[in-house]
Amino acid sequence: MESALSQLSNVDEAKRAEWMELYERMLLIRRAEERLGKEAQAGNLPGGVHLYIGQEASGVGVCSVLEDTDFITSTHRGHGHFLAKGGDLKAMFAELWGKRTGICKGMGGSMHVADVSKGILGANGIVGGGIAIAAGAAMGIKVAGEKKVAVCLFGDGAANQGVLMESLNMSAVWSFPVIWVLENNGLSEFTITRKVTAGEFTDRARAVGLPTITVDGNDVLAVQAAMKEAVDRAKSGGGSTFIETLTYRIRGHLEAEDAFLGGYSYRTQDEIEVWKAPDKDPILRFAARLIQEGAATAEELEELDAQVIGQVDEAVRYALDSEDADPELVFDITFSGQRA
Amino acid sequence: MARQRYIQAINQVLLDEMERDKNIILFGEDVELAIFGDTREVFARFGPERVYNTPICENSLTGMAVGAAAAGRRVILHLMFGNFIYTGMDAIAHQMAKLRMMTGGQMNLPITVIAGYGGGRSLAAQHSDTPYPTLMNIGGVNVATPATPADAKGLLTTAIRGNNPTFFLEASGRGGDSGEVPDGDYLVPFGKAAVPREGQDVTICAIGTMVRPALKAARDLEEIGISAEVIDPRTLVPFDEDGIAASVSKTGRLVLVDEAKDRCGAASYIAGLMADRCFHALKAPIKRVTVPNVSMPYAGNAESAIFPNPEKIVATVLSIVNADQKSFA
């Protein structure tokens, strides 16, 4: 108790506010995706969803040190990144419901949520699809001499795509301001990554001379610290960094997976339970830390949870009440100023 | 007007446009030494800050073009041979062609991809493809196939200043062809066919490299009293349906000349469109002179055997023009 109290004095108001923001952002992702999971399983969404549950600390830690003008590329599991980078929850839900108020006007859906005004160059349905885009964005930044970074968020499945070696090489050759964030959840869709992977991913980055950092991806502050180091390096002209955040995907590759795996699985329930436990789950862990360090009380966190759930409910209502997508739009927006 | 070679016209546009707009970057394999001649002096003039002579990794290069454009730059990507469009296809088909649509129109992707295409020089199957049917079918990228130095200038300028991904396909074997090129700013609008030769009896619609043999065929046909109109779509996406249809409605006959393979090629596509639009004006079946559905063999004689040429075009025209009914105006 005494140590907690002494630490309490160390958490000043600015830090407390920052930590609460990190916590709230993780919680928003969790509650939003729990709802999406339910809606998807009930057949209420037009398409499938790939949930980020269990990995929230990684995306939130990464995006917490970025500006709107910095770019991220994301994955097919991109809701978390979208919300972490400041994407609007209601616009994302409307997108998933296929509505014209959606962030992409209902033309992209779950796997393609993007908000260019926030630097979110899009979730991507192609595993590894964001890798070269991030390298190119960094090239564009460098050419213009801008003080920005491009962050490529990708998974261990994508890390086996050949395009990664190509882009790592160029990012090293030309000191591109790109930060490679490998969110290693151990799973490549329905396959244990270890079974199909030789060596360590970080060694592939070291092979081209990039500095690497491996962090506990379920510790939001550890991820944030690693990212700060990488962003400082990139923005001061020091080039690219490769960060590996070790984490775990609690939900399936996609919400419908039980329906077609026919009772088989690529992992055990025991393994999943280990990662859901309070010492592993990124949100439960950070909640305990906030309470322990006196940054919040259990009651305050419960109150926040209720608020966040209220926001999620409101976003669902917004999506349901919105007008359906405009089927003509695809012809007008495929090209700029030219009808397809 | 000044006489310029095809490849010089392209080179001049690259230099002029990069001078004009500092936001343009250019990258690709061996662009520094410019093996085709089209990027000559570009590296020396604009330096490594705006010109990246890249490693050989098309799969990343096409994606990087998208990223750099999304970050606000105007991008010219040189892919060398048209076949390497296939090696870089992932990001072309999945990102370049779709990102604007999938984001609800949030992004402009001002990307010009330059690649030389076509056979006829014993470069063998992996360096002789005509990949535009694949690009046409992807949807979401423009395709320009300039046949002359003037169109090379006008179409490339339009591509670079435009806001959409455009494949500018150079006629590989035509780099040395000369022609009159307009001075100063010269833009050729996309989706507007050119009629390099007017005629009454038959429309020969020829694409890119095929315009020259089509014009030769038209001259040969004239000698035997057949008046052939040659029309060049200049861009396949967007496509000047109205322009081609007007010509076909006038002549009542259509022969398509296309260096792509016949199956699902540009000629087959245009034949379908024109059968639909001009059915009542047609006096004869629409005919296609294309490359058969095989890859380009190496040996010169084997290559020429399957390549469209003026003789094949003349023979095909003769198969649908009834000499008794033609006009001798």
Image (cartoon, rainbow, N blue to C red):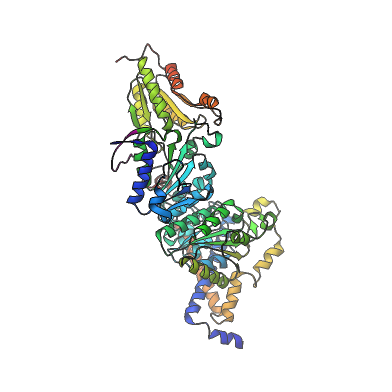
Q: If the image is split into quadrants, where does the N terminus of chain A sit? A: bottom right
Between residues B8 and A100, which one lies in front from this camera angle? B8
Query: Does the stretch in magenta take in B185?
Result: yes
Residue drawn at point x = 44 percent, y = 27 percent: B257
Observer-nearest residue: B304 or B96? B304
Expressed as whole percent of the image width and height from the top left, the position of residue B166 reads: 42, 43
Instruction: Magenta stretch: give its range.
Output: B179-188
The answer, for residue B216, to whether it is visible in the render is: yes
Asked if residue A277 is positioned above or below residue B160 in the image, the reply reads: below
Taking the spot 70% from the left edge, 59% from the top edge, the residue there is A267
Q: Residue furthest top?
A: B324
- Give the quarter of the figure containing the C terminus of chain A: top left
Instruction: State how many labels appear.
Output: 0
Q: Verify whether residue A150 appears in magenta.
A: no
Q: Is residue A19 above or below residue B280?
A: below
In this view, the residue farthest toward the bottom is: A2
* Residue A41 screen position, x and y as percent: 59, 56
Q: Main secondary structure of the magenta part?
A: loop
Closer to the camera in the image, B60 or A42: B60
- In the rendered image, residue A326, in percent from the top left (x then y), is placed at 42, 48
- Left or right for B70, reference B293: left
Left or right: A329, with A209 as reference point: left
Kindly indicate the quadrant of the structure image that contains residue A201. bottom right
Query: Is residue A48 at least partly visible in the picture?
Result: no
- In the picture provided, is B156 more to the left or to the right than A178? left
